[in-house]
Image (cartoon, grey):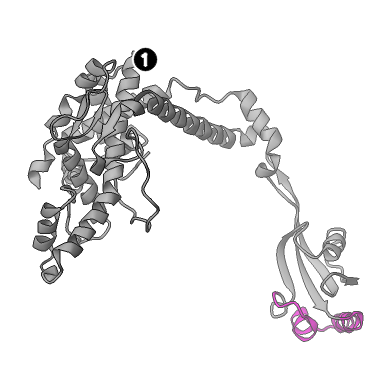
Amino acid sequence: MKSLRSISALGAFFVLAAVAISACGSGLQGNSVADVAGNPITTRAFNHWMYVAAKGQASQSPGQPVIVPSDPPNFSNCIAEVRKAIPSLKKTTDKQLQADCKQLFTSLSSQVMDFLVKTYWYQADATKMHLSVTDAQVQKAFDAAKKQAFSTDTQFQSLLTSTGQTLQDILFRVRRDQIYMKLIAKHPTTVTAAQIATYYQSHQSQFGTKEARDMRIVLTKTKAQAQAAKAALQSGSSWAEVAKKYSIDPTTKNKGGQLTGVTSGQQDAALNQAAFAAPVNKLTGPIQGQFGTYLFEVTKITPSTQKTLAQASATIKQTLTSQLQTSAQTAVDAHAKQDWLTQTQCRALYAMADCKGYKAPKATATAPATSTPAPASSTTATATTTTTSK
């Protein structure tokens, strides 16, 4: 599989995209798996990223061989790989192995295609908006990410080996990530003080705690039983003894009647009203409730709390920033899809949601979770992982 690690077919991508953005798609050419506005995604490039994805999936189960299901619809190469990697399957028919290869192909292909197609889309939109990322900017971002994530070059090389990537792949990801961030930056992602204040006023309950009370209770079926339980407590019997003997509440019966951290509204309405009006350490009852008759004693009161706007601002800003970033990402993807979906043609065997005329297949069993070659959400993560997908 080492030949699949060559990424030269993708090396000229950013030049091709810039030249062909305004051109109409000329149809699928040669052995390409897809074409975006005249820019082909070659089978060689697709197979390489399928190898990266397969390596990622295999890494989730140590000892599992790397199988690349990259020759649909017959999957003859995949079948040969399986037989070579797992000799114990020698009695398994080619038809069975073909079905397994097809399932693996399905679980990986749409994610790989999404990664590659959207890369073209982002570059195309960036070019239309006169946004560019230079080689120097890519190298600077990569160097910073590498320095932060790896203390030695050996560790970085180990990443490449374990994920099946090349240095060019990582740089490809970084460039994609930098372009995507520039597209994101075209949308509002800065949170204002007014927005923080508005959020605080409408979500104050998120930044405080209700008054809470610890209490002991005995719940009985009748008022007479409650009176007997109360007399026993007043005569010196312990709450543990009395609760065990008289209470019908399964939660507290064997715990001395203890309830902790009770906030208003959590208990029977009659008990709630009486308990939140009672002082500490006063035996109260009998109180007739929905489920029986209560005795109770409040043992501790924890006052309510409320953060000020100043105290809550940092948390609110983080929340709103995340919301704006998510909105920006959604807008970028929606804009790219609107511009380029109709010019994205895919071979039937590789078709997915980002392809013109795609029709989703009928629902089938859920595919296993996989590791994909899609970009990470930040330059640093891009240099250190192969499993994040947008």
**Quadrant of the drawing holding the C terminus:** top left
**Is residue 373 shown to the viewer in this render?**
no
Q: Is residue 197 above or below residue 206?
A: above
Q: Where is residue 217 drawn, in percent x and y?
A: 79, 73
Residue toward you, 156 or 152: 156
Element assignment for label 1: loop
Q: Main secondary structure of the magenta part?
A: helix
Q: Is residue 316 magenta?
A: no
Residue toward you, 300 or 243: 243
Q: Amino acid at mark 1?
A: Met
Q: How many marks?
A: 1
Q: Is residue 41 above or below residue 279?
A: above
Residue toward you, 146 or 86: 86
The structure residue drawn at horizontal position 87% and vertical position 68%, both measured from the top left corner, is 282
Q: Quadrant of residue 129?
A: top left
Q: Where is residue 66 drawn, in percent x and y?
A: 17, 54
Q: Which residues are magenta?
A: 222-251
From the viewer's perspective, is 143 left or right of 203? Answer: left
**Is residue 155 shown to the viewer in this render?**
yes
Q: Residues within 10 Å of mark 1 (few under 14, many from 20)?
A: few
From the viewer's perspective, is 273 left or right of 48? Answer: right
Q: Quadrant of residue 112?
A: top left
From the viewer's perspective, is 222 left or right of 84? Answer: right
The structure residue drawn at horizontal position 82% and vertical position 69%, both measured from the top left corner, is 297
Q: Is residue 240 magenta?
A: yes
In the rendered image, which residue does mark 1 sit on? 129
Q: Is residue 3 above or below residue 197?
A: below
Q: Where is residue 256 drawn, in percent x and y?
A: 73, 77
Q: Where is residue 32 drawn, in percent x and y?
A: 17, 34
